[in-house]
Image (cartoon, rainbow, N blue to C red):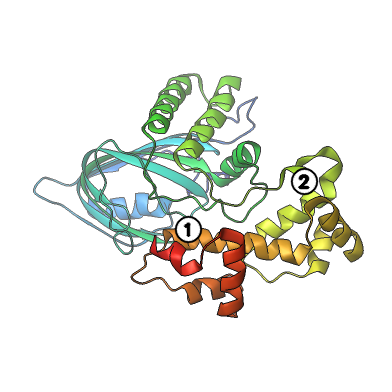
């Protein structure tokens, strides 16, 4: 087994490690990542590759051929291109990570999430790992390509292209049906990135291409997080934008008008007047409206056989089912149970 690494936890590449490291690029200012691990023992792949992802409960064994593995990664703290090849069987859990991870197989078989989704991989078809939560994967005799994109970079490009602002989650649907044109753009960007890697990660072109690749990623998996109102993007609405972004970033947490005002550097009265003047509503009514959008998204993705409207509503802070259903009907033009059954 041989290993060279600039970061011992590649799911968190912004934290420099102690191994071999390229110099930071003069343009990007981001830590370079270069790693290679290979061997022929199941325990070694668990220690080496499992350790990179903070994995647990990993198991590996030979199939009908001698066991071998090879894992490589190259890029920088924002984007890394990776390859994982194993002749054998491997299974394990990966916790929530700091990266979005797109992966596809060029040979072999695999199920990225055997606990919940159980959707098998198709050769050559990209799939996003459900990295917002822990998932349990299972692969056998495979050759896998992976692209890690940092959440910081993806959030930045999403805010620029989709008006998401600072949010707790972009609410990407990792099982959505992919647009063939978006897949073609993604593959083209991967080719350009791989070609530019020959010149290192310190070039202006690399920096540009990583943002282009992130845009292509968001074409594959468009954010479902509610957009910021256009008015808050105006230069003179900086404090209102701070208030609205604070709301979006803390949708799943208890909030008060005082906390929203403090985040924006405004008095309670000033933040109330600002919301009313520019958004035509109060801070708390705006909060409820955006939470209702989140409820709708969860209902649309829910399985009617086991999802509960009441449980989803309660999770988003709506305790009275009757009043919640009325609000939902007024905002979305249908009852929540109708959304779930579609």
Point 46% across, 43% down: residue:
221
CA distance separating discs 1 and 2: 31 Å
Q: Which residue is mark 2?
A: 232
Point 72% across, 69% down: residue:
255
Residue 157, image x and y in percent? 60, 37
* Residue that lies at the very extreme toward the left in this rendered image: 64
Question: Does residue 249 appear in the picture of this structure?
Answer: yes
Seen in the picture, residue 31 relative to 57 is either above or below; the reply is: above
Question: Does residue 10 appear in the picture of this structure?
Answer: no
Give residue 103's quadrant in the image: top left
Q: In which quadrant is the N terminus drawn? A: top left
Seen in the picture, residue 19 relative to 112 is either above or below; the reply is: above
The residue closer to the viewer here, 235 or 135, is 235
Q: Which residue is mark 1?
A: 96
Give residue 158's quadrant in the image: top right
Residue 240, image x and y in percent? 81, 51
The residue closer to the viewer here, 166 or 302, is 302
Under tag 1, what secondary structure?
A: loop
Under tag 2, what secondary structure?
A: helix
Ranked by sequence position, the earlier of labels 1 and 2 is: 1
Point 86% across, 41% down: residue:
236
């Amino acid at each position: 087994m041989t290993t060279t690494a600039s970061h011992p936890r590649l799911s968190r590449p912004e934290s420099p490690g102690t191994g071999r490291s390229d110099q930071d690029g003069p343009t990007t200012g981001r830590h370079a990542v270069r790693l290679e691990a290979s061997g022929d023992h199941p325990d070694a792949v668990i220690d080496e590759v499992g350790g990179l992802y903070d994995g647990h409960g990993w198991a590996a064994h030979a199939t009908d051929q001698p066991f071998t593995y090879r894992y490589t990664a190259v890029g920088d703290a924002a984007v890394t291109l990776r390859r994982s090849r194993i002749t054998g069987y491997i299974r394990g859990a990966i916790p929530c990570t700091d990266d979005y991870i797109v992966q596809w197989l060029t040979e072999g078989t695999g199920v990225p999430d055997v606990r919940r989704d159980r959707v098998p991989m198709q050769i050559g078809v990209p799939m996003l790992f459900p990295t917002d939560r822990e998932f349990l994967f299972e692969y056998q005799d495979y050759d896998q390509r992976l692209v890690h994109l940092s959440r910081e970079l993806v959030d930045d490009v999403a805010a620029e292209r989709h008006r998401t602002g600072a949010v707790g989650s972009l609410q990407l649907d990792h099982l959505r049906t992919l647009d063939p044109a978006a897949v073609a753009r993604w593959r083209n960007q991967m080719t350009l990135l791989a070609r530019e890697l020959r010149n290192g990660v310190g070039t202006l072109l690399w920096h540009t291409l990583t943002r282009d690749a992130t845009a292509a990623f968001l074409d594959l998996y468009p954010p479902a997080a509610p957009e910021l109102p256009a008015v808050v993007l105006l230069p003179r609405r900086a404090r209102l934008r701070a208030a609205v972004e604070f709301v979006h970033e803390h949708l799943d947490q208890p909030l008060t008008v005082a906390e929203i005002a403090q985040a924006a550097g405004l008095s309670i009265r000033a933040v109330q007047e600002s919301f009313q003047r520019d958004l035509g509503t109060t801070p708390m009514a705006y909060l409820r409206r955006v939470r209702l959008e989140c409820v709708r998204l969860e209902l649309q993705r829910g399985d009617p056989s086991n999802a509960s409207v009441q449980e989803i509503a309660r999770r988003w802070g709506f305790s009275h089912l009757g009043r919640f259903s009325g609000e939902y009907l007024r905002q979305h033009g249908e009852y929540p149970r109708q959304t779930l059954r579609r």
